[in-house]
Amino acid sequence: MSQNRLILIADDSADDLFLLKRAFKRVGVINPSVEVCSGQEVISYLRGEGRFADRQKFPFPGILLLDLKMPNGDGFEVLQWIRNKLSVRGLLIIVLSSINEMENINRAYSLGANSFLTKPGSPEELQQLVQSFQEYWILKNRPPQQESF
């Protein structure tokens, strides 16, 4: 069952979403995914509120792929909210961002990111990146255990 955990993808770039989903398909990632394009949508999804209230249709994710630059709450705000408000163990948070300054990388880790990956420049590099973390992040980790909100 762990290989089928939902991946919540938070990125406001339609091009990046297209390339990421194409890389998933080419590598053979079978996990279902849901895309959101703002920090507020990530928080609403994780809370299970608004249009994401139906947990049958929108199950709690096992993996969050989080861009740092988004409208209505950037990735840092999302990480801060998760750290302060969400009681869950096992949610894997992978920051996938074009921002690669050491200060931002350290800040993401200090707020609870499990991994920080810099968005590659080409579709082929993105596919290699997805393939490199697929087995570890997607196939071998336990599903999150939600305690309470």
Image (cartoon, helix red, strand yellow):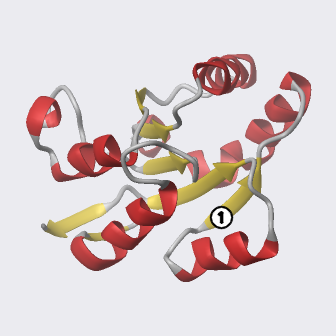
- Looking at this view, name the residue that lies furthest to the bottom: 110
Q: Is residue 118 above or below residue 9?
A: below
Q: Count of labels shown?
A: 1
Depth check: give the residue in front, 98 or 49.
Answer: 98
Image point 90% across, 25% down: which residue? 124
Residue in view at x 44 percent, y 45 percent: 2
Q: Residue at x 53, y 49 (%)?
A: 66
Quarter containing the C terminus? bottom left
State the image coordinates of residue 98 (x, y, percent, origin top left). Answer: 75, 47
Q: Position of residue 73 (x, y in %)?
A: 39, 53
Against 60, residue 80 (above or below) is: below
Is residue 92 left or right of 104 when viewed as pictured?
left
**98 vs 127, nearest the viewer:** 98
Left or right of 51? Residue 6 is right
Any part of residue 65 in sight: yes
Residue in view at x 59 percent, y 24 percent: 17
Q: In the rendered structure, which amino acid carries the disc numbered 1?
A: Ser
**Residue 130 coordinates in the image, percent (x, y):** 74, 38
Q: Is residue 24 above or below residue 78?
A: above
- Where residue 29 appears, as percent x and y from the top left, is 61, 28
Snapshot quadrant of residue 78: bottom left
